[in-house]
Amino acid sequence: MKPVIAVVGRPNVGKSTLFNRLTKTRDAIVADFSGLTRDRHYGDATIGGRDFIVVDTGGFEPENPTGIVREMAKQTRQAVAEADAVIFVTDVRAGVSGQDHDIAKYLRSASKKVLLAVNKAEGMADSPLLAEFHELGLGDPIPISAAHGQGIGNLAEAALLAALGPAAFDEQEAEPVDSDASSVPIRLAVAGRPNVGKSTLINAWLGEERLVAFDQPGTTRDAIVVPFERGGTHFDLIDTAGLRRKGKVFEAVEKFSVVKTLQAIAEANVVLLLLDATQGVTDQDAHIAGYILESGRAVVVAVNKWDAVDAYQKEQLERSIVQRLPFLKFAPVLQISAVKRQGFGPVWKAIADAHASANRKMPTPVLTRLLLEAVQHQSPKRAGAFRPKLRYAHQGGMNPPIVIIHGNSLEHVTDVYKRFLEGRIRAHFKLTGTPLRIEMRSSKNPFAEKRP
C-alpha cells in the first residue's frame, strides 16, 4: 500500500507548486491567485525508489468557514484524515499569520505526523526569519522553494520517513505487484457548462463528498482525476471545469481552467456530456459537443435534473437535442438525477458500449465486403466524366475508428454517400457512442500523366 502525504496550508502559500514539484507534473493549476485549488487533487510521486501518493488541497480555514470555503475545509479535513503524514506549507515572506496558528492547532488535535515546510525561502536556509515558525509548535521548520526546487528532496524524504517509520526503510523486499495493476483504466471525463451538476454526479458515483459541489458557477477550476472501480472495471473519473462562452471568460484563472478542461477532453477515452434539463440545450452546450466531436472522443449525453421538469419541458428538451446537436446522432441520450441518484445504471452501460465501440477491431475482409455490397446496392454519383470506383477498405485507427477506402476518383465522392457508407458500417459493427471517420484515398493512374 502506497503511503499518502497530504499538503495543507492557507491560500496562496505554494501548495499546488509543491504538488507539481513532487509529482513532476503540471497537473495542478498554479497562478498568483488565492483560493485556486478547491478539491482534493491526487498525484503519484517517487523519491529514492519509493512510491507515494500526494494530495493537494485548497486553502484551509479551519475556524468558522462559510460558503464555499466551508466546502473546501471539508475536503482538506478528509485529506488529513486519510493521510499517513501531512506537509503543512507556510510562507516565509508573509511570516506566521493567525490562520497559520489555527491550522497548526487543528493538525495537533488530529494527531497526525506533521512536517512544517516554510516555502519561498530560496537562499534563506540560515535566515533568522525561520525562527518565528517554531511558535507553531510543530517542530523544526524545513526551508524550501517549491518554485525553484530547493529543499524538496529533503522534505519528501522526511515526509516518507514520518509516514512509514524508520523500520520501513530497512526492509529491502518490494511489495508484491497487484495483478490488476497492469490494467489500463478507462479515462472518463465529465464535461458541461458551469453548474450543471458534474461534481455532484461524481460524488454520487463515489458515495462520498469527494469533490466540492456548491450552487455557484465555476466551483471546479481544475481537472480533478479520481480513481474508481465498478464491476471489476477501473476508471479515472475526470471532473472538469465548466466551459463558458469565450466572451464570458474574463479571469486569467478561468482561462487556465478552460485549457485544462480541453486537455482533459482530448486525453479522455469517453466523455460524458452533461446537460441541464431546467435550462435546455444552449449555444455553450453545442460548442462543447462540437469540441468533443473534433477531438474524436466517444461520447454519452446525460440530461441531469430530469426530475425537476414537467412533461411538456421534457418533450421540448428532446426536440432541442435533436435540432441543436444533430452531429451527435451516434451518441446515446439518457436522463438522470445526480441528486436523487437515478438513472445511473443505463449511463454506465452506455459508457461501456461507447468505449468498446471506439476500440472495435474491423477486419479488412469484412470492411471490403461491406463496401462492395454498399456499392452494389447504391453506387456513388458520377461527377462529370468521372465515376468514383471504390475497390477495398481497411481500418486505419481506433478511438475513434477510422476506415480508409481505396479506389479511383474518390475525391468526387459526396458527403451524402460517405454518410451512407458510415451508416452501413455502424450497423454491421454495432458502433454506438463513437464518431466514425472515413478517409478516401485515390490510386494514381500512371497512364494518365500528362506528356511534355
Image (cartoon, rainbow, N blue to C red):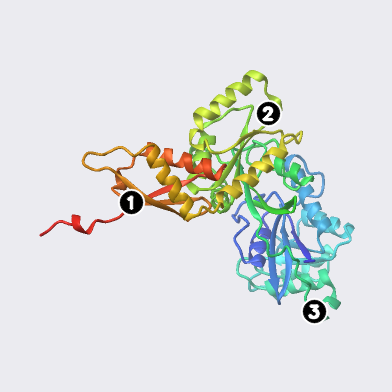
Q: Out of 121 and 364, give the one closest to the viewer.
A: 364
Amino acid type, callout 2: Trp
Give the alpha-carbon distance from disc 3 to disc 2, as whole Å.
Answer: 53 Å
Left or right: 16, with 136 as reference point: left
Residue 247 visible? The answer is yes
Q: Residue at x 46, y 51 (%)?
A: 402
Left or right: 383, with 2 as reference point: left
Residue 377 placement: quadrant? top left
Amino acid type, callout 3: Glu
Amino acid type, callout 1: Gly
Residue contact at pointers 2 and 1, CB within 8 angstroms: no
Give the alpha-carbon distance from disc 1 to disc 3, as whole Å.
Answer: 60 Å
Residue 87 visible? The answer is no
Q: Out of 23 and 350, give the one closest to the viewer.
A: 350
> Residue 137's x, y, as percent?
85, 65
* Labelled disc at residue 173: 3
Give the alpha-carbon distance from disc 2 to disc 1, as whole Å.
Answer: 48 Å
Mark 2 residue crowding within 10 angstroms, few (<14) / some (14–19) / many (20+): many
Judging by the rendered image, the residue that carries numbered circle 1 is 407
> Residue 12's x, y, as percent?
66, 55
> Residue 253's x, y, as percent?
57, 48
Q: Out of 449 and 214, give the one closest to the viewer.
A: 449
